[in-house]
Amino acid sequence: MNKQEARALLGDQLDRMAGTGYAALAARLGENVVLEATGASGARYQIEIQIVWDAAPRGALRLLGGIDDGGLSAFVPLSESRLLDPPQA
């Protein structure tokens, strides 16, 4: 697995999902999103993103992402996360 390519693909997907906003993601809490992506090299990757509370309900949300190429990396996927704070009243 090309770790640089995989990290860029995962980061793009996490940023795209985080860009939908806190309210949209809170409505999808507990959801596991599974996507497939193809890197510039032609390698195919599977991306899984989980939407969870970071520490306490109604607090920050965490997007937990993992990516692998279906080979040995499936046993130890590359992972990354994003934290979204709730809107301030």
Image (cartoon, grey):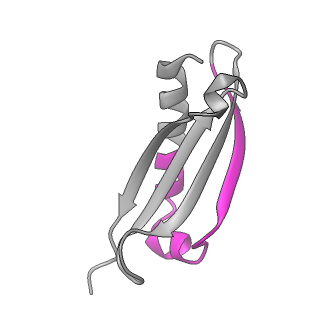
Name the residue rendered at 48%, 29% in the picture.
8
Q: How far from the left and from the top, in percent, is residue 72?
A: 66, 24
Residue 25 is a magenta residue:
yes
Left or right of residue 65: residue 87: left
Image: 20 above or below 55: above
Left or right of residue 32: residue 5: left
Q: Give the range drawn in magenta.
A: 14-39
Q: Spot the residue most to the left.
A: 88
Image: 83 above or below 80: below
Name the residue rendered at 48%, 30% in the picture.
7
Left or right of residue 60: residue 88: left
Name the residue rendered at 52%, 62% in the picture.
20
**Which of the pair 10/54 is nearer the observer?**
54
Q: In which quarter of the image is the C terminus?
A: bottom left
Residue 69: quarter of image = top right
Residue 51: quarter of image = bottom right
Image: 66 above or below 85: above
Q: Spot the residue most to the top.
A: 41
Residue 43: quarter of image = top right
Q: How far from the left and from the top, in percent, is residue 5?
A: 53, 21
